[in-house]
Image (tube, grey):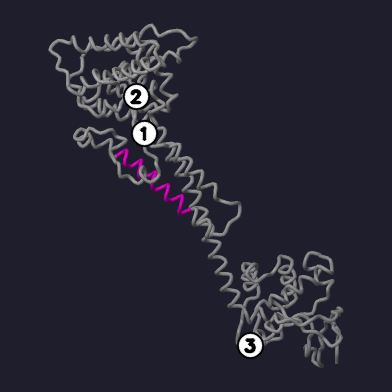
């Protein structure tokens, strides 16, 4: 007896190698195989791109599986379903018949189902005398059983790739955040380095990150960014260690910014500082021979005239109180952190610290890290190896040399330098070191 359960015209379809391969695989399914159809369907969803299936095609596969009454699929059972197009469209949440046919073809090409065509191209099942189905024509879902392990392996590979992709994106996010924080810390704390170039290097790396990219591309960018992270970290750690090495610093008398000349951070990336203004102060041990009296305000202003730019209304600086107020304005404009300023005031005294700020401000175009230079001088002041006198004298000498070059103000600059020199020479029982005498008598070395 033959019973037509559902009929739908198929039309003639070409046979493809993909169809033949699927049929061969389906015939090879072990008879004792058993799978959970929804577990396999989840693996297929995860491996969708690797299989070449579309979202619409999977929606149709979901509907086809729902027409099989059992959740467990066995290798020795009949695995053909025969829904009509109308039933499929309804269970697949609605789609045009042409779209349905197109995505059914995708499922066949991907080897997820096999067409079992009847002689007249319609889908139906033939039942026997006992009501059992003897022959069914429609869609064979046996590849779900036959390829279950393959789908599982593909899904695991896809999940692993997604996890690796997520991890590399997390690496990039964390590394970007840490590098930005370390750069901000270096600038805020006055760590000596060319932070402008560091930022440029950082921007050049992150600028390579596209909107969408394969994991391998992101890993290469992450490795490059981690290299920059390591170099910035090394610079910060070296700075911290150098500040604690007062004994070594007093032994070699070198500026903190050249205390590690072989540093990869400085030599390979060009992130070190130029020769800082007033470098002769750090290179000479002449504090023992400097005058004990304070510098006159007039001499300081002659050496550091740029401080007058900071006075509101364009007025002059008439006393030390107004000079200290101007120093408070100069400090943040140079990027000197509050902690570095407070440490300098404690070590040098408020007035000496303000003069130091004025001298640095005068030559800030020659100093890459004003905060780092101030901290270096503060460390020397703590061990009695720093005075503002050589800085001011060097500025006056530079002013005199510049005046001679331009032919203007040379006489006034010479008077300023002579006045400061008299203060040095008239100190009672004062021993002038060779280093200080060289800074006074020979052509200026600048600051």
Residue assigned mark 1 = 274
Q: Residue at x 83, y 83 (%)?
A: 124
Disc 1 is placed on an element classified as loop
Disc 2 is placed on an element classified as helix
| Residue 87 place in picture, x, y as percent | 82, 72
The numbered disc on residue 236 is none
Asked if the stretch drawn in magenta spans residue 364, the answer is no
Q: Residue at x 12, y 12 (%)?
A: 429
Residue assigned mark 3 = 28
Disc 3 is placed on an element classified as loop
- Of the numbered discs 2 and 1, the one sitting upstream in the chain is 1
Q: Residues within 10 Å of mark 3 (few under 14, many from 20)?
A: few
The numbered disc on residue 342 is 2
| Relative side of 213 to 344, left or right | right
Q: Residue at x 60, y 84 (%)?
A: 33
Q: Furthest-left residue in view?
A: 429
The residue stretch that appears in magenta: 222-240
Q: Gap between marks 1 and 3, in whole Å? A: 76 Å
| Residue 20 place in picture, x, y as percent | 70, 84
Q: Gap between marks 3 and 2, in whole Å? A: 82 Å
Is residue 241 positioned above or below 278 on the image?
below
Are the residues flagged by discs 2 and 1 in contact, CB closer than 8 Å? no
Q: Gap between marks 2 and 1, in whole Å? A: 25 Å
Query: 176 or 205, which is in the foreground?
Result: 205
Query: 196 or 330, which is in the foreground?
Result: 196
Is residue 236 positioned above or below 157 on the image?
above
Q: Furthest-top residue in view?
A: 318
């Amino acid at each position: 007896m033959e019973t037509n359960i559902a009929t739908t015209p198929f039309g003639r379809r070409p046979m493809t190698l993909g169809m033949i391969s699927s049929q061969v695989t389906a015939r090879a399914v072990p008879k004792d195989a058993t799978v959970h159809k929804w577990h396999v369907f989840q693996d297929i969803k995860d491996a969708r791109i690797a299989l070449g299936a579309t979202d619409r095609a999977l929606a149709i596969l979901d509907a086809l599986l729902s027409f099989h009454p059992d959740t467990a699929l066995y290798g020795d059972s009949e695995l053909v379903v025969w829904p009509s197009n109308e039933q499929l469209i309804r269970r697949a949440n609605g789609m045009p018949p042409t779209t349905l046919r197109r995505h059914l073809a995708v499922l066949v090409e991907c080897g997820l189902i096999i067409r079992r065509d009847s002689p007249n191209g319609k889908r139906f099942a033939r039942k026997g005398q006992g009501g059992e189905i003897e022959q069914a024509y429609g869609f064979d879902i046996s590849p779900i059983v036959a390829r279950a392990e393959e789908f599982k392996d593909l899904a695991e590979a896809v999940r692993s790739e997604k996890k690796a992709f997520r991890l590399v994106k997390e690496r990039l996010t964390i590394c970007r955040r840490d590098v930005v924080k370390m750069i901000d810390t270096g600038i805020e704390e006055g760590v000596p380095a060319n932070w402008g170039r560091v930022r440029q290097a950082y921007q050049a790396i992150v600028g390579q990150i596209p909107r969408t990219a394969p994991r391998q591309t992101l890993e290469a960018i992450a490795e490059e960014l981690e290299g920059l992270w390591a170099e910035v970290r090394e610079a910060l750690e070296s700075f911290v260690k150098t500040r604690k090495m007062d004994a070594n610093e007093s032994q070699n008398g070198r500026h903190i910014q050249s205390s590690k000349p072989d540093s990869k951070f400085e030599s390979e990336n060009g992130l070190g500082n130029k020769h800082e203004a007033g470098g002769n102060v750090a290179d000479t041990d002449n504090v023992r021979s400097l005058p004990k009296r304070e510098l006159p305000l007039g001499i300081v202003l002659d050496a550091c005239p740029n401080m007058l730019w900071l006075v509101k209304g364009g007025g002059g600086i008439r006393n030390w109180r107004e000079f200290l107020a101007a120093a408070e304005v100069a400090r943040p404009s140079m990027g000197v952190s509050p902690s570095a300023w407070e440490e300098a005031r404690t070590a040098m005294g408020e007035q000496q610290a303000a003069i130091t700020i004025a001298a640095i401000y005068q030559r800030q175009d020659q100093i890459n890290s004003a905060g780092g230079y101030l901290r270096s001088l503060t460390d020397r002041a703590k061990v009695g190896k720093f005075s503002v006198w050589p800085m001011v004298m060097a500025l006056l000498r530079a002013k005199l040399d510049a005046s001679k070059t331009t032919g203007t103000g040379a006489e006034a600059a010479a008077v300023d330098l002579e006045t400061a020199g008299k203060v040095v020479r008239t100190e009672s029982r004062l021993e002038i070191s060779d280093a200080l005498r060289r800074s006074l008598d020979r052509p200026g070395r600048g600051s």
